């Protein structure tokens, strides 16, 4: 059994790290190391084997070495994660002569993708969190790291009637201040009023003739891109004013939920302007904006070539993304923070959303 108090120097002297390393192989980054150690330390009762795939995804140490390392870290819950960074960043690919005989299919691939920096994120790396919507009934057990609360009720110009209570509950239950998301869609149906599409830009012809839209699921007047921009801008304005009146204002970041379940135009230029209009309104309130979506939805709705623009204080900044990966676990979600490339080129992934099974409440890990 490992001692309860153990120093990094002691760890480095363990025989499992005496294996010669090949020259010139890539080591783990400080960010990767800090995230890996934080996850392991946060789960002292979890078997070491549960973390092996996470550790070996970033360095080709053997399974036995990874299990020994994990046991050492779990035995030192009071040691800051940063104390183990020199240890983890020292790992490189073992030489061929020292690797055990295994089939290639058992060696996890090392991603060549380098994740953009998450500097500026309001979420503490490796923290676990939840997202709450107007339909949430089974609240997760507190305490937890963070929460993202929906201000809308599933689509544009709707309001979550339980926003104030959910925001207050999240404030008391999480270590980070709650943040907010809102749903967007193109200007169709009863919400596409003259007021909602008439400004701030001037549209000579905001709508064309009625056409069938597969994405919108019906026959509607065809919106022009400028009508889309105004609709997105005013959707964000309505949500912001509602949140402010409910005293649930969050300046840290607002997320735009972009999903194909809502009504969108078959013309991706219209949809792109809806998104840009919402970003521009919130930026004018000095609020950073991120995008929640998945690659295939984003391409279908906004188009392959669209990269939203964000400007705060006169400075252009990348738009962060919140990336759902479906049924998974915490280890895979944390791994995805470093291996999932954003659907917006050059944008950092700040949150990975996952569920443990098909009926579970959405869970999230901060990157």
Image: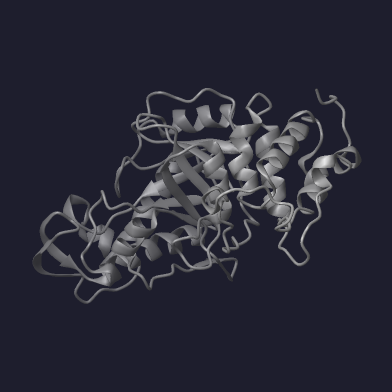
Q: Give me the residue at 80% from left, 50% from top.
A: 19
Pick the residue in front: 254 or 331.
331
Q: Is residue 245 visible?
A: no
Give the camera-side residue of 322 and 115: 115
Q: In the depicted view, which residue is nearer to us: 95 or 109? A: 95
- Quadrant of the image for the N terminus? top right
- In the rendered image, residue 174, in percent from the top left (x then y), is placed at 59, 31
As displayed, is residue 208 above or below residue 281? below
Residue lying furthest bottom: 204
Residue 143 can be seen in this image: yes
Give the image quarter of residue 232. Answer: bottom left
79 on left or right of 174:
right
Whether residue 172 is situated above or below residue 363 in the rendered picture = above
- Residue 331 percent location from the top left of the image: 56, 39
Residue at image x 21%, y 61%?
Answer: 194
Q: What colouring method underlies this structural image?
A: one colour
x 60%, y 66%: residue: 313
Q: Position of residue 67 (x, y in %)?
A: 69, 36
Marks counted in the figure total 0
Residue at the image point whose x is 70% and y is 58% from the top: 96
| Above or below 14: residue 282 | below
Using the rendered view, name the quadrant where residue 151 is placed.
top left
Residue 22 vertical placement versus 226 (above, below)? above
Q: Quadrant of residue 25?
A: bottom right
Residue 149 at what x, y percent from top left?
45, 38
In-image side of 207 versus 34 (left or right): left
């Amino acid at each position: 059994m490992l001692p309860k108090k153990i120093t990094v120097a002691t760890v480095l002297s363990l025989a499992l790290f005496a294996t010669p390393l090949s020259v010139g192989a890539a080591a783990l980054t400080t960010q990767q190391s800090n995230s890996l150690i934080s996850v392991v330390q946060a789960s002292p009762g979890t078997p070491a084997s549960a973390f092996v795939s996470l550790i070996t995804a970033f360095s080709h140490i053997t399974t036995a070495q990874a299990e020994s390392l994990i046991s050492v870290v779990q035995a030192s819950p009071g040691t800051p994660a940063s104390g183990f960074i020199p240890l983890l960043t020292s790992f490189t690919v073992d030489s061929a002569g020292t690797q055990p005989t295994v089939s290639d299919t058992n060696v996890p691939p090392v991603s060549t993708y380098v994740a953009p920096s998450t500097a500026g994120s309001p979420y503490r790396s490796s923290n676990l969190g939840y997202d709450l919507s107007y339909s949430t009934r089974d609240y997760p057990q507190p305490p937890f790291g963070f929460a993202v609360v929906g201000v809308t009720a599933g689509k544009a110009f709707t309001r979550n009637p339980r926003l104030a209570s959910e925001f207050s509950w999240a404030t008391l239950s999480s270590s980070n201040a709650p943040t907010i998301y809102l749903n967007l869609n193109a200007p169709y149906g009863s919400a596409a009023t003259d007021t909602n599409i008439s400004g701030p830009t001037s549209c000579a012809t905001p709508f064309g003739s009625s056409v069938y839209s597969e994405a919108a699921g019906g026959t509607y007047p065809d919106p022009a891109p400028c009508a889309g921009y105004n609709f997105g801008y005013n959707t964000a304005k309505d949500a912001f004013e509602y949140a402010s009146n409910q005293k649930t204002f969050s300046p840290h970041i607002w997320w735009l939920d972009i999903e194909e379940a809502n009504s969108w135009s078959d013309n991706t230029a219209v949809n792109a302007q809806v998104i840009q209009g919402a970003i521009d309104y919130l930026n004018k309130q000095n609020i950073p904006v991120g995008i929640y979506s998945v690659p295939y939805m984003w391409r279908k709705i906004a188009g392959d070539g669209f990269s939203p623009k964000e400007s705060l204080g006169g400075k252009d900044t990348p738009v962060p993304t919140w990336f759902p990966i479906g049924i998974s676990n915490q280890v895979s979600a944390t791994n995805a923070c470093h291996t999932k490339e954003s659907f917006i080129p050059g944008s950092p992934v700040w949150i990975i959303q996952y569920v443990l099974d098909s009926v579970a409440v959405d869970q999230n890990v901060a990157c």
